[in-house]
Amino acid sequence: MGETTNRAADFWSGLALAALGTYIVLEARQWEYLGPEGPGAGFFPLWYGIAMVALSLALVASSALRKPGGGGIDWRNAGRSAAAWLAFAASVAACKLVGFAVSFALLTFFIVAVLYRRPLAVAATVAVAVAAGFQVVFAMALGVSLPSGVLGF
Amino acid sequence: MEILSSLAQGFAVALAPANLLWCFVGVLLGTVIGIMPGLGPPATIAMLLPLTFQMTPAAAMIMLAGIYYGAKYGGSTTSILLNVPGESASVVTCLDGYQMARKGRAGAALGIAAIASFVAGTVGVLGLMLVAPPLARFALAFSSPEYFGLMTLGLALVVLLAGRSVIKALLAALVGLWIASMGTDLFSATSRFTFGQMELLAGIDFIVVAIGVFAIGEVLANIALREGTQLLPVPKGLRNLLPTWQDLKDCRFAFLNGSVVGFLVGVLPGGGSTIASFLSYGLEKAVSRRRGQFGTGVIEGVAAPEGANNSETGGALVPLLTLGIPGSGTTAILLAALVLWGFKPGPLFIPENPTLFWGLVASMYLGNAMLLVLNLPLVPAFAQVLRLPVYVLYPLIFGVSMVGVYSVSGSPFDLALLAAFGLLGYLMRKLDYPTAPLILALALGAGLERALRQSLMMSGGNLAILVERPIAAVMLSLALVVLLIPLVGRLNAWRLRALEPDGG
């Protein structure tokens, strides 16, 4: 909460949800609605899909009728979040190849060195320390299995 | 008499060395998490839940509950010393707590917050102990239509109080229902919304969504901001943390107010500790002889909300344990935890699992006492947590989230889903969609659909069954009234005031 309501954001998110609601309704129509033993698989999704379409269109309409206002998007801050998410997603994808320890160390290095602009030596130390700490605490002490890569850890 | 013997049995469980240790770990972790801005109890409980599978259910529940109420104690420290709430329930504590600290009375503010939390937290547990068993007996008469009505009412209340826009809150809840529908329909074996993925046939694990939306989404939103807050000096020594006799006298009504308002709001689904603290602050201000000074550093302005947000915990566990209906994101995760451990929260939970219920109740008495002892002399040590650089904290949260999700299923696909739900959580925060309705709808979705379909099977497809049975009819009518509140100007103004950070 606390974010300034943005007219364009409401408009576009409303349209996206209307599309999702339409997809739900179309899918639900392919499943049984009411059978001899009672409601089928399509009964519940059909109704919440219809509700989603109706509410999202109401959101679109109300945002279209509202006067322009609210804060714009802070692209610099959004860029930092986007970079962090991309790094996280890349780290998840890399887990299969290089294992959790290496991919997590690389993610940490990126956050410290690039997003928080700390010296490379600091970033490398933090990255190695947290990755090693996770390996010791979770894999060795708690026996939790972590994704391993071609290197075997 | 029966309650006392059950409680004695509970203390036997809670005082077992292992459970005592987990209770301590829980309240300690909770305090640390409460202190850290940007990491709340739902995110932490979601992250740690998979790691509790190796513990006994009693130990795990005691620890997770400890995190839940321990965070409420910790949240006040950040509000008072930084003017930044450690968690949402402590927002209102900033108003008078930070002003007291600026005037050199940080010690008294921190001390009264801990004492009020202890008093009201203990009253909340007392309420849980007295209200839960009779409510569970009453709920034994519930059947599918009543459960459908109850879950609908719970969702409606959460939607009403989750954010400024009821439409957005409803949409968030509908997305939650959609995610809950994914996988194989248990009635007909039809696969729904699986996009041809084998991994989705069993549905999406609640933990993946909860960790993604709460933990990853929260970090992504916070990482955009650069730190710029100044920590006020932390008072050292127990003497500097104890409020004066006059302070305690001034707070007499605040203790009572916080205890009662907090518990009652907690019992209502959707209320939550933030609403409880605001209502309690508003009531304190309304009846105070020095109401004009509120916001300038009045000690009752710290005691009332801090008491309320702790008493709310006991109240929130009442519908969770007796009806299986969570009222907030955190209790939704606790519900998922109980289900994952093989329990069925509902009217039979207490009779079938007396050891777990009474052990939890007893551990909460002990945990509140531990928190009082921990928080008074150790506040300076806890405040050092605020010096942990965020560039270390955020990777740690990413790492624990990945480990938590992977340890549940061992599936890289779930890690990819975690990234996707993290992005969803971030977008929801940025676009001002509340996350609580989504998580609650996800937790209740399967039960809601099952209750509706079973009701219609009972009636041969006749929807009238939902309004012919008195309890179901009352609950559905109340849900309708709740959803119509935003359309009534004066009531909507009250709702919006309750949601405003400075709306006391």
Image (spheres, coloured by chain):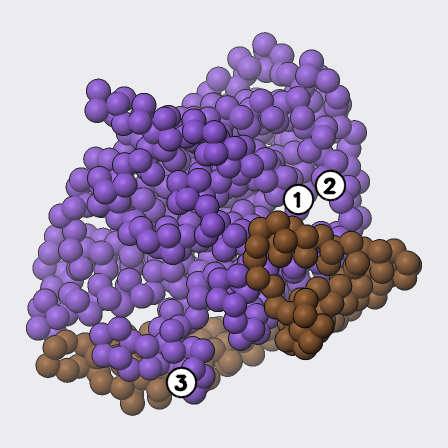
Chain colours: A brown, B purple
* Disc 2 packing (10 Å; few <14; some 14–19; many ≥20): some
Please tell me whether mark 2 or mark 3 is closer to you in this view: 2
Chain under numbered label 1? B
Residue at 68% from the left image edge and 70% from the top image edge: A152
Residues behind callouts 2 and 3 on a single chain = no
| Tags 1 and 2 touching, CB below 8 Å | yes
Q: Is residue B191 left or right of residue B109?
A: left
Residue that numbered label 1 is attached to: B36
Label 1 to label 2, Cα distance in Å?
6 Å
| Tags 1 and 3 touching, CB below 8 Å | no
Q: Is residue B248 left or right of residue B264?
A: right
Q: Quadrant of residue A90?
A: bottom right
Return the residue nearer the eye: B178 or B501.
B178
Q: Is residue A28 left or right of residue B283?
A: left
Please tell me whether mark 1 or mark 3 is closer to you in this view: 1
| Residue B59, label in figure | none
Chain under numbered label 3? A
Return the residue nearer the eye: A147 or B89.
A147
Return the residue nearer the eye: B82 or A85.
A85
Residue that numbered label 3 is attached to: A22
Residue at 38% from the left image edge and 60% from the top image edge: B443
Q: For the residue labelled by badge 3, is the local secondary structure a helix, a strand or a loop? A: helix
Residue at 31% from the left image edge and 84% from the top image edge: A28
Chain under numbered label 2? B
Q: For the residue labelled by badge 1, is the local secondary structure a helix, a strand or a loop? A: loop
* Type of amino acid at the residue the image marks with label 2: Leu
Residue that numbered label 2 is attached to: B386
Residue B326 location, x and y as percent? 37, 50
| Tags 2 and 3 touching, CB below 8 Å | no
* Disc 1 packing (10 Å; few <14; some 14–19; many ≥20): many
* Type of amino acid at the residue the image marks with label 3: Thr
Residues behind callouts 1 and 3 on a single chain = no
